[in-house]
Amino acid sequence: MKVLPTAAAALLFTGVSHAALAQTAPSSPVPSMAAERSWSSTLAEDATALHDTMISSHPGVYDTLNPGFRDRLDAGLVQALDRAKRTTDAGGWWWAALSA
């Protein structure tokens, strides 16, 4: 079940998504990984946004030769949201978002 972590890594390393290409630059600076924040909420928000992006734009959702794609994607979200409950810092976010 590496769909969600692999996709998260791809988005993190490229720094670009379809949604990002269509948006203007944020009016405030993007916080760094060292910034104080609720890492649990951040992980839940990131995982949900990634899941929604995959649902709306990935051809695997419609691939009749890969009927389990959506189930694996949904299971990845459930796993990430479960891990978010225990995430307290940037390292926990990184582990939860990128490991299977």
Image: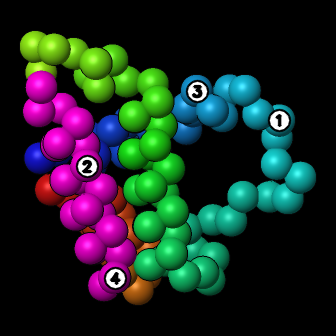
Q: Which residue is mark 1?
A: 24
Indicate whether 26 appears above or below 99. Answer: above
Q: Which residue is mark 4?
A: 85
Indicate whether 55 appears above or below 48. Answer: above
Q: Which residues are magenta?
A: 67-86
For the residue pair 62 and 17, the one nearer the viewer reads as 62
For the residue pair 77 and 43, the one nearer the viewer reads as 77
Q: Are marks 2 and 1 in contact (CB under 8 Å)?
A: no
Q: Amino acid at mark 2?
A: Asp
Which of disc 1 and disc 3 is earlier in sequence?
Answer: 3
Q: Which residue is mark 3?
A: 18
Q: Is residue 62 covered in magenta?
A: no
Which of disc 4 and disc 3 is earlier in sequence?
Answer: 3
Residues at marks 1 and 4, CA–CA distance in whole angstroms: 32 Å
* Left or right relative to 92: residue 34: right
Indicate whether 53 appears above or below 44. Answer: above
Residues at marks 3 and 1, CA–CA distance in whole angstroms: 12 Å
Indicate whether 98 appears above or below 61. Answer: below
Which of disc 1 and disc 2 is earlier in sequence?
Answer: 1
Packing grade of label 3 (10 A; few <14, some 14-19, many >=20) is few
* Residue lying at 46% horizontally and 30% vertically, measured from the top left: 56
